[in-house]
Structures are given as C-alpha cells and as structure tokens.
Image (cartoon, rainbow, N blue to C red):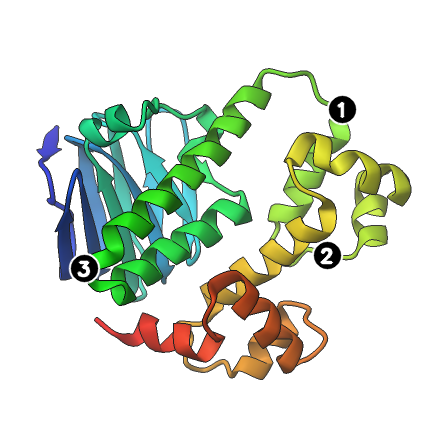
Amino acid sequence: MKLSKRGQFYGNHNETIFLDKMVLNDSDYLKKGRLPWHFHENAYFTFILEGGVIEGNKKEVFECPAGSLIFHDRHDPHYNIASKKFTRGFHVEIEPSWFNSFDINSAVNERGVNISDPRIRILMYKVFKESKTAGKFRQLGIDALLLKIFSLLSQETYKSNEKKPQWVSKVRDVLDAPSSNLQLTAIAREVGIHPVHLSREFSKYFHVNLGDYIRAIKIERALSLLPNKDLSLTDISFQCDFADQSHFIRTFKSYQQITPLHYRKLLQKK
C-alpha cells in the first residue's frame, strides 16, 4: 500500500501552498478509473469543489459529489474511483505538530469521515476563500477556521454515544437529501413529529436552531452549484429555495463576506 508523504496528492496540481504545519493543495482529477489503496503521512481534509469521486475505506464506500468534505486521520487507508466528469478537489493537510500546538485530538468519530454538517462544509469553503485571497495573512485566518471545524466535530463526537430519539436520525437523513423540502411543516411530517416539538427540540441535538441550520444548508448547496457555469445566480437561488436573487445574495454575503458572483470568480481561478 502506497504512503503519500507531505504535500503528495493525486491529480494535476493547480496550486500547492506550504504553510506552518499544514499544506493546502488545489488539484484537478482528469484521470478515469480507480486510484489504488493508499494512506497519508498526515491527517487531511479532501473537499470536492466540482464534479465527484467515489471514496472507499475499510468500513464503507460512498459517493462524494460537489460540496462533499472527507476527513482522514493519518495512516487511514482508503481508495478512490474517479468519475467520468471533470473533478476538482481542495486538500488541507495538517501535521501532528499543529494538533499538538492547540491541544487537539486529530481523531474524529465514525460519522466524521464523510462530514455532512453544512456548517462545517461552509467553514471549509471559507478556508478555500482564505487560501485564494488572504495572501501572507492566510495562516492566521485558516488556523482560526480549522479550530472552529474541529470544535464542531468534537461536539458531534461528544454527542455520538448519547441515546437520541429516533426522529433525530430521520431528520438528519431528510436534511442531508439533496432534494429535500426545507420547510418546517414538511420536515416534521416526513419524520412523524409535531412541528412545534421539532422546532423546540432541534437545537438540543444539532447545537443550533432549525432556522439557522436550514439557512446553512441552502448556502452550502448554493456554493456547490457555483462552479456550474450553465446556472445563473437566479437559477441557483431558485434551486436553493431562496425567495429571490437579492435575498440569496444578502444571505450568501452574511456567511462568506463576499457576493456569490465574487466567490464564483474565485472558483474559476486556478
């Protein structure tokens, strides 16, 4: 099984940035077929910006479309199957000394391998933005964002062993579905509980109120659609259930501090 050393990733490297205790890598995957079993010297995130891959490890095989965020601890064996379409990935490789300097355990729970929480994926879009715009100050911003990401992952780990009502996993599945109806009454009907109960109890298990979580899902979905040049901003706002384009732009800017058009231009730079 092949060991990938620091800064080594498959694909055509558009940009590789070496920072203190971490490496940022922006790559295209043009080769079809299966990448063999391998593992990396350091822990790292793979963030699919465009296209998609299939990820396999010792426990499961899952599809990773645009917007997918995968975390591997160091020496975690896995393989990938490239899709038939153009795929672009952003990697954040983190050395053990980074975790030690912030007194963080790099291991995350089983669910953390394929991260579905839209708040975490939005943070990784912010990491990508920092890598393209912050210049010599990117280290500070990216360190802060990664600390937020691991804080959210630790919340998930802490709660993973707690006994939860059955509706919690059902709500998670409904919200994770790409075509889900993000209306309170529709979600409550889908999982079989009263809307008032869902609204009141949601934050106990998801660490944020339902309205904020749904807004995060909408923005995260919009970000995953921005690389698609066939979609206008109006198309994207409609597909993501915003009232209109102006509402979409305002909400997007509140999360990313730049407009969707500006972020689309960042995604087009290589």
Q: Which residue is mark 1?
A: 165
The tag on residue 182 is 2
Whole-percent x and y of residue 166?
75, 26
Secondary structure state at the residue bearing disc 1: loop
Q: Nearer the viewer, mark 1 or mark 3?
A: 3
Tell which of 254 and 54 is nearer to you. 254
The residues tagged by marks 2 and 1 sit, at their Cα atoms, a distance apart of 21 Å
Write down the residue under mark 3: 136
Q: Amino acid at mark 1?
A: Pro
**Quadrant in the picture for residue 31:** bottom left
Mark closest to the chain's N terminus, 1 or 3: 3
Residue occupying image coordinates x 60% and y 73%: 250
Residue 181 placed where, x, y %? 73, 58
Q: Which quadrant holds residue 104?
A: top left
Query: Gap between marks 2 and 3, in whole Å?
Result: 40 Å
Does the CB distance between marks 2 and 1 fall below 8 Å?
A: no
- Secondary structure of the residue carrying tag 2 is loop
Q: Amino acid at mark 2?
A: Leu
Identify the residue at image location x=65%, y=36%. 206
Horizontal arrangement in the rendering, residue 228 relative to residue 254 (left or right): left
Q: Decide if residue 178 is in sight here.
A: no
**Disc 1 and disc 3: Cα gap in Å?**
47 Å
Instruction: Name the kind of residue labelled 3 in the image.
Output: Lys
Residue 148, given in percent of the width and then of the height, sits at 44, 40
Q: Nearer the viewer, residue 141 or 270?
A: 141
Q: Secondary structure at mark 3?
A: helix
